[in-house]
Image: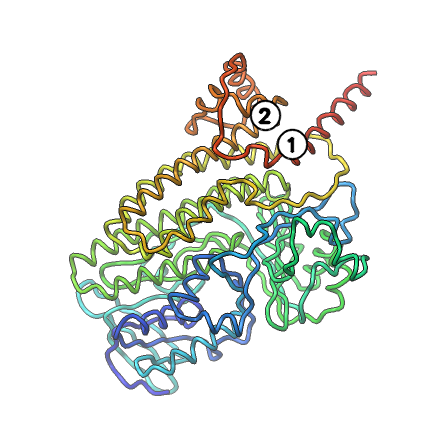
Amino acid sequence: MNVTKHKYDVVILGSGLAGLTLSRHLLRETDKTILVLDKSPDVPTTKQKYGESSVQVGGYYYSKVLDLETYLWHEQFMKYNLRFYFKTAGRSNTQFEDYAQAYIRTFSNIPCYQLDRNRFEADVLKMNQADSRFEMLHPVQNLAVELSESDRHTISYRHGDTDYSVSTEWVVDTTGRGRMLARQTDRRAPSPIDHGSAFMWVDGTVDLEKLTDRSPREIRLNKNRRETGHTPHWLATNHFMGEGFWFWVIPLRGMTSLGVVYDNALIDGKQFTSAEKLLDWICTEFPLFERDLRKRKTVDFNVLKSYAHGCTQTISSSKWAMSGEAGRFNDPLYSPGSDFIALHNTLIVDAVKCKSARKLARKCWLSEMLMQSCYNSLMPTFVTTYDALGDQETFVLKYTWELSAYFTFYVFPFINDLSCDSEFIPAYLSRFSRMGAMNQSVQSMISGYFQWKKDSPVVDAEPICHDFTALAPLARAEKMFYEVGVTPDEAKNILDEQLIGLTEFARFIVAYIHSIVLGDERIMTNRPFIEAIDFKTIEFDVEAMKAEWDRHSGSFEEFEWSFCPHALDKFRDQMSKRGHMAMEMMQTSES
């Protein structure tokens, strides 16, 4: 293709997921002309792409904002939520039914999708190319960007045997880990996250429920279906959990994506340097896969030794921006990649549409504050409690808390088009900041609780099936998916109500952990103790926890929760068995 213009409204560097979806977004909502430049000779690349799973913000963005809903239902898989699996002590864990499970049983009211990235990007590219305002060139060489503070930017490159120079009002970097603008402008920043990943794709669909000695009839009539339901588990983004790591199983059309993500401080990444090594590790760590994966053909394999990175600025009123991994990336645990693309792209399109220099400056300032807040708020999730991933009870506390906050502060504003509202964002950030100290304290308590549990005797147990929505604060937060078309003032009031509920839930988590560690269930209803919880000072210290409880244990004034506080009793019973075993071991050693 030849360059047909010398001036463009927007030049996008990189033709991956962020760049192609941004192009479609701009084509749908503006009259701008777009040039996409990519260094790769193959677009999409022949190398299979990771990052297939979407959650609610990304799913809503692709289906509703980009109007790809019909396409997604026909050509990609609808996702059956995130599901988590934990090995059961005393079992061989060679069969699916050996594993404890945690999940949300019903489909999300905001559909999410499993994307074959290569196929998805190829199809979006074709849609974009149907619009005469869109042009794309690849491969380009000698790509250079000359940014201007007050005038049009200049982009130079070589395509074929010809050198080109074009001017543009906006330039957006979506080069992924190439991070062209962040490098050029010296805006790269380190991340406190030091995690790695190794991943592969195999042919066909890995059906977890068939990894068993049970007959098809026994699988159908499994009594656990009372809790887990009949929807095929293989449609989910399935996570098998361990201390400091997790392993994903994601279905794509015609193949299955498999990958491990791990904390470099806890797990040696040398175990995963080849597809063969990764396969050996999978079958050793989670033996049920031995009966399936060895028979499959490997489609592709890749490794990222350390993937997290920060950025000091991702959008400027000088009319440049970054989206996707070209800016910031933290961790793939809850599939946030498409969420951040959705947020960045939405803010960029809103800025491109702005005609007032004064308003643009404020928009870009607020947008940067918003994205930095969203990025930084997730750090405790990935830095503080990655050790606690391998224990079902601690993970249930962690994920239910985090998902309640996600539905409230990420999904709700996005589906109401409030992410770009200059009136709403300051009020939003004010409320969001109140979660900071509370979140850090909750995360620290959960990590401390996990480390404390590790010293307790392991008991043979029956696998537990747990629906996260058994804890009502999460079910309430999910109802925000139905709160649409609200004004900024209405949204502020809704967030205030949710903050009250989240604060109560945080108190519940702290009280619950105290009641288990101190072996006294009265803590769960002791009003003075619960109301005295200070998230600025609370920490997991058993002696301090005992002293705090001693201060209030004499009171009989009861605290009434707004939800059932017994949703986790099955875990309490399990810990009670550990306590009895510990007592028996102590008595035996004394005698």
**In this image, 183 relative to 379: left or right?**
left
In the image, what residue occupies the spot 54% across and 21% down?
Answer: 545
Cα separation between marks 2 and 1: 9 Å
- Position in image of residue 8 (x %, y %): 26, 76
Q: Quadrant of residue 166?
A: bottom left
Decide: is 301 above or below 551: below
| Residue on which the image places disc 2 | 515
Dot 1: few (<14), some (14–19), or many (≥20) neighbours within 10 Å?
Answer: some
Of 54 and 305, nearer the camera is 54
- Position in image of residue 14 (x %, y %): 40, 71
If the image is split into quadrants, where does the N terminus sit?
bottom left
In the image, what residue occupies the spot 37% across and 57% down?
Answer: 415
- Position in image of residue 396 (x %, y %): 58, 42
Do labels 2 and 1 touch, CB within 8 Å? yes
**In this image, 24 relative to 260: left or right?**
left
Dot 2: few (<14), some (14–19), or many (≥20) neighbours within 10 Å?
Answer: some
Q: Secondary structure at mark 2?
A: helix
Farthest residue, direction right: 591
| Residue on which the image places disc 1 | 572
Of 143 and 257, nearer the camera is 257
In the image, what residue occupies the spot 47% across and 58% down?
Answer: 110
Which sits earlier in the primary sequence, circle 2 or circle 1?
2
The amino acid marked with disc number 1 is Arg
